[in-house]
Image (cartoon, coloured by chain):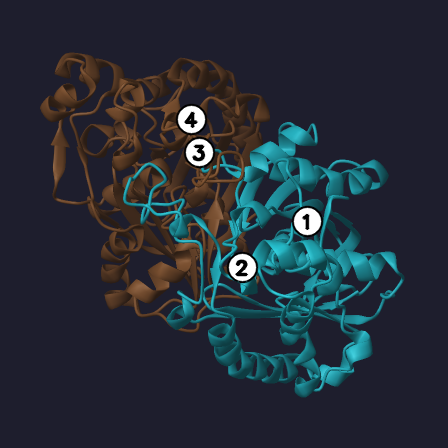
Chain colours: A cyan, B brown
Amino acid sequence: MFLGVRIAATSLWASPEVVTVEQASVEVGRSPGWIRRRLGVEQRARFHGLPEVQAAHAARPILERHGAPDLLLNASATPRQLIPDTAVFVARELGLDGIPAYSIHATCLSFVVALRHAAALVAAGLHRRVLVVSSEISTGQVDPSEPESAALLGDGAAAALVTAPEGDEGLLAWVMHTHPAGAEFTEYRGAGVAHPPSDPRTTLADNRFHMNGPAIYRMARKRVADLLDEVRDLTGLSPGDFDLVVPHQASGNALASLPRYGFDPDRVVDIVGEYGNCIAASIPMALAHADARGRISRGDTVLLLGTGAGLSVAAAVLRW
Amino acid sequence: MFLGVRIAATSLWASPEVVTVEQASVEVGRSPGWIRRRLGVEQRARFHGLPEVQAAHAARPILERHGAPDLLLNASATPRQLIPDTAVFVARELGLDGIPAYSIHATCLSFVVALRHAAALVAAGLHRRVLVVSSEISTGQVDPSEPESAALLGDGAAAALVTAPEGDEGLLAWVMHTHPAGAEFTEYRGAGVAHPPSDPRTTLADNRFHMNGPAIYRMARKRVADLLDEVRDLTGLSPGDFDLVVPHQASGNALASLPRYGFDPDRVVDIVGEYGNCIAASIPMALAHADARGRISRGDTVLLLGTGAGLSVAAAVLRW
């Protein structure tokens, strides 16, 4: 089902403070070679401020050029605080008053979900300029004894402005599947009702990110293959047909596995070496990175593709 | 902008364990009379389990009668844990595998936002049966030294099934405004990047709900009046015209103020005495409560109206 919509602008921002692979090696007790080989990460940004500050750094260039939005969506996994939701603080930081602001949470897939949400509202004529921001700050909450995540997760933010189309741009297809059998493969068990911060039984481990990379990979492999079959059935496009592929920057290994599905490595955006895995910000950061380098032209078919805690898999096909 | 959509079913569930006004009086150090007068609360449910269990109790009767949904939206302020998002656990609890499941967070207005989101997707033909659940468990996280919130917040859940219309049912209007100047009026400052659970500087007060009732009320009064003017401009309907008014159950005082805007008290759903303020679950619980009692007929105009942390105000007008 086609939704006429245009991504009018993209932007990314990451802190200039960088954790190099050598520094990470000391922090997690693995060699730089191990981190490079297993995770594909050469460096990651580390930000000591608040999510809305990072989000505003990403969004400001878009607002300066395109003016204020009429809807603000925060599409992030890590919140600023429990209440109010993070979108309110992003609005405050950007000086936006009066427009609706709220959050969509689908962990690493939050941006892909928010993009479709924005597209449905714009296509229905309900909004004209939707600003979607993803801002993740996780480097302070990793478990150093779990190098697979502690040396992988990075801080960063991205923004995209979704407007009405000027031609035949739009969302050609969107597919998502959630398989709760994988709910425990990626977890941060605290910060909610299950293990409240104020409960003395809540442990430090509950308040850290945990990932079972091999389990995710095993479950995702088949699910992603099925998802790509579904995309082909819906659009007629096979992996080799996309002009640009913007995957979630799950890990170097995950990105390296993409050619097996038939993707051309030259058309896959790979920024995990420079930024690590920035949770929900990874896909819009990769999109903005490619956009800034002139890798997308109007009329191109662009595939956004990712997995998220859940386990969920999702794909969005855009005609740019 | 009209979105053709039908609320095919509603349901609510609250724990049989009840905190009476007498028990609350002991817990917060105020007389039962004070609680009744200031908050309008006679009792509230208290649930010791997980949000997805409460959500599933509410949703199961709908699924048993109408079958499985093709999209699951969790519209709640309090999460089960940080990652994965709560929708995954609701899907698991309901035995749903493969449908997209994600969360929308706009604190007390989460259901109102999710309803419009569902309506836009159904009206575009992208989904046929969207299950929206709201489940809030906050009674364990209140601050007993702040009776205005500690004797007000209750636990509860509600669900609604959104489908394609069978006639001229639909969402006639939807308006929301977020005013970040009120960001600090309702807060739970912990459980995020600002005051992480693992940070020793995070205080117990950070991990409790706080409400500045009078400040919210002062700001909301004018904003709600403006919102109702906007609804009238969009639909031609004034407060006295609605067949049913389903307000957020913010407090007894907030509900008592509604006739000032021109609402007929007999058409306003008031369940705060029985359930307290159940955050995002309050509006769908009130809707389900009225629906179960035969207070809504097909063709009726129904107004959902609320304020949320932010400060946000929102209204949705449905033709039932």
Query: Residue A156 has which mark?
Result: 1
Q: CA distance from mark 3 to mark 1?
A: 25 Å
Horizontally, is A263 left or right of B231 in the view? right
Q: Position of residue B111 (x, y in %)?
A: 42, 44
Closer to the N terminus: mark 3 or mark 2?
2
Check whether the beta carbons of the residues at disc 4 and disc 3 lie within 8 A of each other. Answer: no
Query: Residue A56 has which mark?
Result: none
The three-letter code of the residue at mark 4 reads Pro
Please tell me whether mark 4 sits on a helix, a strand or a loop. Answer: helix
Q: Position of residue B254 (x, y in %)?
A: 34, 20
Front: mark 2 or 4: 2
Front-lying residue, A125 or B96:
B96
Marker count (numbered): 4
Q: Which residue is mark 2?
A: B121
Q: Which residue is mark 3?
A: B200
Local crowd size for mark 1, using a 10 Å CA cut-off: few (<14), some (14–19), many (≥20): many
Dividing the image into 4 quarters, which one contains the C terminus of chain A? Answer: bottom right
Closer to the N terminus: mark 4 or mark 3?
3
Q: Chain of mark 1?
A: A
Q: CA distance from mark 2 to mark 4?
A: 28 Å
Dividing the image into 4 quarters, which one contains the N terminus of chain A? Answer: bottom right
> Residues at marks 2 and 1, common chain?
no
The three-letter code of the residue at mark 3 reads Pro
Q: Chain of mark 3?
A: B
Q: Which residue is mark 4?
A: B239
Front: mark 3 or 2: 3
Q: In which quadrant of the rendered view does residue A36 lie? A: bottom right
Q: In which quadrant of the rendered view does residue A262 lie? A: bottom right
Q: Judge whether B220 appears above or below A91 on screen.
A: above
Q: Position of residue B256 (x, y in %)?
A: 30, 18
Q: CA distance from mark 2 to mark 1?
A: 30 Å
